Amino acid sequence: MRRDEPISTFLLAILGLIAQAPRSGYDLRKIFSTTPMGHFSSSPGAIYPALGRLEKMKWIEGRIENPKTLRPRQVFRLAPKGKEALTRHVGQPVTHDDIVWKVDDLLLRFGFMGDLLGREATVQFLGEFLARVEAYIPVLKQHLESLARHPAPVPTGRFALEHGIESYELQARWARRVIRELSPVSKRRPRAG
Amino acid sequence: MRRDEPISTFLLAILGLIAQAPRSGYDLRKIFSTTPMGHFSSSPGAIYPALGRLEKMKWIEGRIENPKTLRPRQVFRLAPKGKEALTRHVGQPVTHDDIVWKVDDLLLRFGFMGDLLGREATVQFLGEFLARVEAYIPVLKQHLESLARHPAPVPTGRFALEHGIESYELQARWARRVIRELSPVSKRRPRAG
DNA sequence: AATTTCATGTAACCAGTTACATGATTCA
DNA sequence: TGAATCATGTAACTGGTTACATGAAATT
């Protein structure tokens, strides 16, 4: 078995967007530069070579729309190989390192997951996510304590770490909420009485 | 006037840490790999060349500790030019783009700011940060509304965006709290009665 | 005696940034 | 008529990743 080629956050974004609907390089640029999705800025020098690579790997395929014009618009759609790779990637288990170094990536994977994996797998993903986050918070609090032992006149370092901790706590709350909303309530039991 | 050479998040982290105390490449690697500070992973292939560049720019200067051994430990301290550049960089005004694409960078700047700029400038920075965040939240809510108009069976995209909005709301609360804590309360007025 | 930790670095590769280039079409 | 938008791309540069390499000192 060949090992999976790793999918960077940037490629993930491109693949995910193309999975939602066929798109051109220009479409992607617009999305990256105008919507909250994708704070990966995107210059043509990043997008077009990436699309070229994905096409060469047979993960996407381009179809030229107006063949006669000089610079015809080329729309890419996801090829079976790409769909397989993308699906496998977003469904990967959540690791500790993901939580510490790649939250953005996790959130992006989550954002595309609904259509690709369905409800059950999504809930499972959130469960793993929640467990990892809950395990990490105490570690951060430990660091905070040792930081607090060296007081500074303007302790911005400590405040920054507190911000980090609060962020993870928020993520845990968010995950719990979404799990709840995605779990079948078997038609919300009517109030007794 | 020569334009400032831009300081990447990675260089910022290195400079800020060296500003706190003289450190070797190895020290930095340890910090990046073991503490919550710096989710910029750091391989030697990133750290050592970066230190080399900073030294060539005269922003830091290295002092070799055990000159006789084959691989002597080299400890870097911040040079005046580096301190000036770092101070200028962290004190830069908070822009909209920072809020959207470089929150990590902002938090890092904030974390180092206490020692470099003092209380007043820090509070001002937080004020700008808060204003930008408060201005951005409605924009995100707008996007959320338009997303909500295309319902999906498992709307993970919508949930991801909600996560983003909640994060910014948290940041606003955090900023308000820290501003409060850093503002001189003129000795907390004793309760009347 | 073997493993881990301290400590620094290089080389090949890959990918992203910036700036440049082209030219049609639509709008003011 | 001039500006903005649509639309795609290349070239030079820079910097980060991975993997490799070296070897002393401390620990087990």
Image (cartoon, coloured by chain):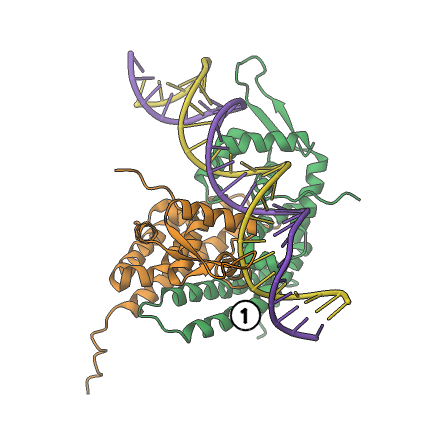
Chain colours: A orange, B green, C purple, D yellow
> In the displayed image of the protein, which residue is found farthest to the front?
A68
Residue visible at 59% across and 27% down?
B75
Q: Outermost residue, bottom direction?
A: A193
Quarter holding the C terminus of chain A? Answer: bottom left
* Percent of width and height locating residue B118: 67, 50
Nearest to the observer: residue A14 or residue A187: A14
| Residue to which mark 1 is pinned | B139
Considering the image in quadrants, where does the N terminus of chain A appear?
top left
- Which residue is depicted at the point 53% across and 14% down? B70
Q: Is residue D18 left or right of residue B86?
A: left
* Above/below status of B131 relative to A151: below
**Left of B134 or right of it: where is A119?**
left
Q: Along the line of sight, which residue is nearer the eye, C11 or B184? A: C11
**Residue B23 seen in render:** no
Label 1 resides on the chain identified as B
Amino acid type, mark 1: Val
**Mark count:** 1
Looking at the picture, how far across and down is residue B141, in whole percent?
49, 71
Q: Residues within 10 Å of mark 1 (few under 14, many from 20)?
A: few
**Lateral position of residue B53 relative to residue A149, left or right:** right
Residue shown at the point (39%, 58%) measured from the top left: A77
Does residue B73 lie above or below A42 as drawn?
above
Q: Tell which of B32 and A87 is nearer to you.
A: A87
| Left or right of B127 on screen, residue B162 | left
Question: Residue B177 at x, y = what percent?
Answer: 55, 63
Residue A113: quadrant of the picture: bottom left
- Residue A132, how many percent across, how many down? 33, 51
